Image (tube, rainbow, N blue to C red):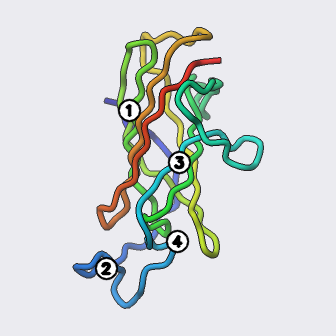
Amino acid sequence: MRVLLVLLVACGGKSYSDSGEAAGTSLTPCTGSGSPSLTLGDATSGELAPWTDGAAVSLGTDVFGTPGIRIDLVVAGIDATEQATAVVDLDVGGVSDTYIGKVPLDCFGDGPADGTTFAGLPEGSSDSSGTDVTLSVTLTDERGVSASQDVSLVIE
């Protein structure tokens, strides 16, 4: 298992009641109202194009030059005022790895929130066109509320 490294600005912590609400507040779309949901896709054109099973995915590189998959996401029902913990399970052509890291989320007005993370290709996996990719992402907020999505993709 690798740890996903992301450089982030530290945010202050919150105190939560037994109902999961931050002390002294009521939940809004940006603080976790509604049912948790997560949509994965590609937002390089400016708006999220959700991935569906069988969709083609392009490979890119992270800031260190590691080849992998940029994962853009839209999430609702979790607290987007703090960083969420992401668990990314990635299988590329039968070679798997798990990445865990913090994902900063942006939420404006009535939400939903969006963010981006990156999963490097597992060591020893293929980056050849046509290779099957299985991606499972779970985001969890500080209250312990999670949203997940699984999708099967194909490398372009």
Residue type at mark 4?
A: Cys
Residue type at mark 1?
A: Asp
Instruction: Return the mark for residue 147.
Output: none
Q: Which quarter of the image is occupied by the N terminus?
A: top left
Instruction: Return the mark for residue 89.
Output: 1
Please name the residue that numbered disc 2 is placed on: 15
How many marks overall? 4
Task: Label 2: state its secondary structure.
Answer: loop
Task: Label 3: state its secondary structure.
Answer: strand
CA–CA distance between discs 4 and 3?
Answer: 16 Å
Residue type at mark 2?
A: Ser
Instruction: Of the two numbered discs 2 and 3 on the same chain, state the one appearing first in sequence.
Output: 2
Task: Label 1: state its secondary structure.
Answer: strand
Instruction: Of the two numbered discs 1 and 4 on the same chain, state the one appearing first in sequence.
Output: 4
User: Could you say which is closer to the camera, residue 55 or residue 63?
Assistant: 55
CA–CA distance between discs 2 and 1?
Answer: 30 Å
Crowdedness near tag 1: few (<14), some (14–19) or many (≥20) residues, C-alpha within 10 Å: some
Q: Indicate which label's residue lies in the foreground, 1 or 3.
A: 3
Which residue is drawn at the image coordinates 56% and 39% (left, top)?
71
Task: Label 4: state its secondary structure.
Answer: loop
Instruction: Of the two numbered discs 4 and 2 on the same chain, state the one appearing first in sequence.
Output: 2
Task: Specify whether 135 is left or right of 55.
Answer: left
Which residue is drawn at the image coordinates 56% and 34% (left, top)?
52
Image coordinates of residue 81 in percent, x first then y, are 49, 70
Give the vertical position of 56 relative to 138 (above or below). above
Q: Which quarter of the image is occupied by the C terminus?
A: top right
Please name the residue that numbered disc 4 is placed on: 30
CA–CA distance between discs 4 and 2?
Answer: 16 Å
Please name the residue that numbered disc 3 is placed on: 39
